Image: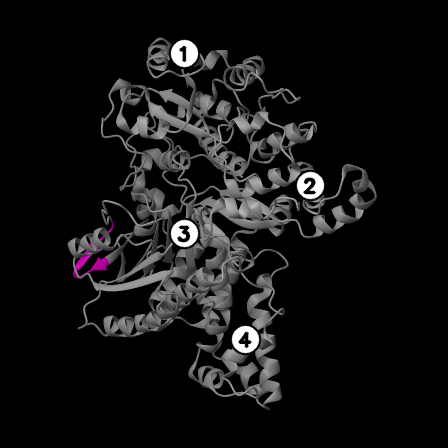
């Protein structure tokens, strides 16, 4: 498939707003390195921090989600290609920008390579917007918000079709504006599919998502069935007798990308960011409300409603792009952040497995309201999760599971606060990055050798060099001493790594979580060209309980695509080994491609399989037994990984299943009771699950996106 074809070329939309009374900093950037602190409600909303100026653009942003994202939306597509669209990540390309910056180089860079299609704006900007639109050669006349409607939407579809594809027959099915923005993350991703398949739009009735979700899942299973039958080369005449049986099979194994938003801020963050007067305006958060509807006046609504609309928008935008499904969960209760802060604080004083289990239980109890029926059923069908939230949902255990959610399914986190930056960041979408050439890994050692931790970390990195030799043509690993921030920047500029591993101490104090580079605490690393992936081999650089300003999040704002960080202090030897295993799996994927499509898939594989090391590394007795030779002539740990655990580990029960297999091995050696006792006393901590991957690791591919799509092509 040729994704650079005219029909695949994205359509470009611009939504304008006026910033701060018409005065805007010409150095405007969608990335910020400081938290937004509001002085009054005229400037922004609380508690998530959405600029009131930017909120005026919400009617236009929502309208754009109902327009075609590429010209391929007009073309009759086969079922296999509709299913493969999950790999393509076809975002609506929307430039959200103050009107006085539409002529800047930043805007030109965004619009480069797009079909300049339509400019939308509030009514008071329409005359100026029309002039700019004409100067920049947009295809359609500027649209004022007050004129947006079902009728204008149909007219815009027809006008785009006439302008770009006058000789292509129009697909049937008239688009319609959603009247329920709270349900749009479910309904809008299905609208593209409904138009292609000649299905009616999902009916919206009542206040409940459940019927919508089940209908959407059914339609996805029908699509998967048709795609499979196409791939197998069946003719239309031979499909009917096979359809029901194949659909039951596809429904049973259906997996699709899921986008979740879980609003809520840590009480400690609110106390830091907002005055007591502003905190008095913070309303009790509602999951949804009767006013959650599209309207040209949506930006004038109360504080909480405006924030909900923006959160629902980023969820829907992302879900549409991944051809999946989205949900906005109930607000995370303040008590959950308090319990999380206690859990993170516990590790500072040294881990105690029994206490960690107790604190995790309390965390689950504090978040029961998050798990709606539709959320649970949707997550069980997820191929991966993108989570817009300030709270690490991956630490929670889904009802019926025994391991936290991050073991069940790959999770990519996107910070939700400040909401202004979340909205901007979602709309500055990086294209998929293909790592199908030689990958450069740079290990930056920021801890002096005089520090015992620095000496241990350097010893750990020696193991990584063993993976380079057999794959030298595919993977290069460089290790450098970077004891100052300038040395780090110079090393990154020189080596231009795809993966930067930063070996440093973490510094978490005064509700700021940074990196210690030499003797300096750094929050902003200031790379001229940020590496696509940064792996922070450091303690508690991504705490969430107190809503800290964290280097993990700020790296995303600097332009890093994916960041791996830790929520808690971790032992240097364990941390080095999980990083080395990560590199080893990258080397294996490069040498024998096909097992892991994206960086997110590969990281989840490493994270879950590290459960056995969490258990065996918990105490000296278990470690000695794990490293001792078993009946197969190799260590028990190697026997477990290579043979005994194969096909027996369920991700949702990874620790329970790992214990069971290890106990069976111990029984055969006559030490089963001892080993089972060590599992409980002193016990172990699921440390691997306290790492989180933030950003867009699902967009980093180990092969070209075209290769992923081509796997769906029907047999000749």
Question: Mark 1 highlights which residue?
Answer: 123
Element marked by disc 4: helix
Instruction: Quote the CA–CA distance across marks 4 and 1.
Output: 65 Å
Taking 26 as reference, is 79 above or below it?
below
Image-based side of 417 in relation to 661, left or right: left
Question: Local crowd at mark 1 within 10 Å, few (<14), some, or many (≥20)?
Answer: few
Question: Local crowd at mark 4 within 10 Å, few (<14), some, or many (≥20)?
Answer: few
Counting residues from the start of the chain, the first of labels 2 and 4 encountered is: 2
Counting residues from the start of the chain, the first of labels 2 and 3 encountered is: 2
Taking 54 as reference, is 398 above or below it?
below
Cβ atoms under marks 2 and 4 closer than 8 Å: no
Counting residues from the start of the chain, the first of labels 4 and 3 encountered is: 3
Taking 280 as reference, is 660 above or below it?
below
Q: Position of residue 95 (x, y in %)?
A: 38, 27
Residue drawn at x 22%, y 46% as measured from the top left: 526
Residue drawn at x 41%, y 18% as measured from the top left: 119
Question: Mark 3 highlights which residue?
Answer: 435
Element marked by disc 1: helix
Cβ atoms under marks 4 and 1 closer than 8 Å: no
In the picture, which quadrant includes the N terminus? Answer: top right
Counting residues from the start of the chain, the first of labels 4 and 1 encountered is: 1
Question: Mark 4 highlights which residue?
Answer: 642
Residue 216 sits inside the magenta stretch: no
Question: Mark 2 highlights which residue?
Answer: 214
Q: Which of labels 2 and 3 is toward the front?
A: 3
- Considering every residue shown, the one lying at the far top of the view is 127
Where residue 534 sits, quadrant-wise, is: bottom left
């Amino acid at each position: 498939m040729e994704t650079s074809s005219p029909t695949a070329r994205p359509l470009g939309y611009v939504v304008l707003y006026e910033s701060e009374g018409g005065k805007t900093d010409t150095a405007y950037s969608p990335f910020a390195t400081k938290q937004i602190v509001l002085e009054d409600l005229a400037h922004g909303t609380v508690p998530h921090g959405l600029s009131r100026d930017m909120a005026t653009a919400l009617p236009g942003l929502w309208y754009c989600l109902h327009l075609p994202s590429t010209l391929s939306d007009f073309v009759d597509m086969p079922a296999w290609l509709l299913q493969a669209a999950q790999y393509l990540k076809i975002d609506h390309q929307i430039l959200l920008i103050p009107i006085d910056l539409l002529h800047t180089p930043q805007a030109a860079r965004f619009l480069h390579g797009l079909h300049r299609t339509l400019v939308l704006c509030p009514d008071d900007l329409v005359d100026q917007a029309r002039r700019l639109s004409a100067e920049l050669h947009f295809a359609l006349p500027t649209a004022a918000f007050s004129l947006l409607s079902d009728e204008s939407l149909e007219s815009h579809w027809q006008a785009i079709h006439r302008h770009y594809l006058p000789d292509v027959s129009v697909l049937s099915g008239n688009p319609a504006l959603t009247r329920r923005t709270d349900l749009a993350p479910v309904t809008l991703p299905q609208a593209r599919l409904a138009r292609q398949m000649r299905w009616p739009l999902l009916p919206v009735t009542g206040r409940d998502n459940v019927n919508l979700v089940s209908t959407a899942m059914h339609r996805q299973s029908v699509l998967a069935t048709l795609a499979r039958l196409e791939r197998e080369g069946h003719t239309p005449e031979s499909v009917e007798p096979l359809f029901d049986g194949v659909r039951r099979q596809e429904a049973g194994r259906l997996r699709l990308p899921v986008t979740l938003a879980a609003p809520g801020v840590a009480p400690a963050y609110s106390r830091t960011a907002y005055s007591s007067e502003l905190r008095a305006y913070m309303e009790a958060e509602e999951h949804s409300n009767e006013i959650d509807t599209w309207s040209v006046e949506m930006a004038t609504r109360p504080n909480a409603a405006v924030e909900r609309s923006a959160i629902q928008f980023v969820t829907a935008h992302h879900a549409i792009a991944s051809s999946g499904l989205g949900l906005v969960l109930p607000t995370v209760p303040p008590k959950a952040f308090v319990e999380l802060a206690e859990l993170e604080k516990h590790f500072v004083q040294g881990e105690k497995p029994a206490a960690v289990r107790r604190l995790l239980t309390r965390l689950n109890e504090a978040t029961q309201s998050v798990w709606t029926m539709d959320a649970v059923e949707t997550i069980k069908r997820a191929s991966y999760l993108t989570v817009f939230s300030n709270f690490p949902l991956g630490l929670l255990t889904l009802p019926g599971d025994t391991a936290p959610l991050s073991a069940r399914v790959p999770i990519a986190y996107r910070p939700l606060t400040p909401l202004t930056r979340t909205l901007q960041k979602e709309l500055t979408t990086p294209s998929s990055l293909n790592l199908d050439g030689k990958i450069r890994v740079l290990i930056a050692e920021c801890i002096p050798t005089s520090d015992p931790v620095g000496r241990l970390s350097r010893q750990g990195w020696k193991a990584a060099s063993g993976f380079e030799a057999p794959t030298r043509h595919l993977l290069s690993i460089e290790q450098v001493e970077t004891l100052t921030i300038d040395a780090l920047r110079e090393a990154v500029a020189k080596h231009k790594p795809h993966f930067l591993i930063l070996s440093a101490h973490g510094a978490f104090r005064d509700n700021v979580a940074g990196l210690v580079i030499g003797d300096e605490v750094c929050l902003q690393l200031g790379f001229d060209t940020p590496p696509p992936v940064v792996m922070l081999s450091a303690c508690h650089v991504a705490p969430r309980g107190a809503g800290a300003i964290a280097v993990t999040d700020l790296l995303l704002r600097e332009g890093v695509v994916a960041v791996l960080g830790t929520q808690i202090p971790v032992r240097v030897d364990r941390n080095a080994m999980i990083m080395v295993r990560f590199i080893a799996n990258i080397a294996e994927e490069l040498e024998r491609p096909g097992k892991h499509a994206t960086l997110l898939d590969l990281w989840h594989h490493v994270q879950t399989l590290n459960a056995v090391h969490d258990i065996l590394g918990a105490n000296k007795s278990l470690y000695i037994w794990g490293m001792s030779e078993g009946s197969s002539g190799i260590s028990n740990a190697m026997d477990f990984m290579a043979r005994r655990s194969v096909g027996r580990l369920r991700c949702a029960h990874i620790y329970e299943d790992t214990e069971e297999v290890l106990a069976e091995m111990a029984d055969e050696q006559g030490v089963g009771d001892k080993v089972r006792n060590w599992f409980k006393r002193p016990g172990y901590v699921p440390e691997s699950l306290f790492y989180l991957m933030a950003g867009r690791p699902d967009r980093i591919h180990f092969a070209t996106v075209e290769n992923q799509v081509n796997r769906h092509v029907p047999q000749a």
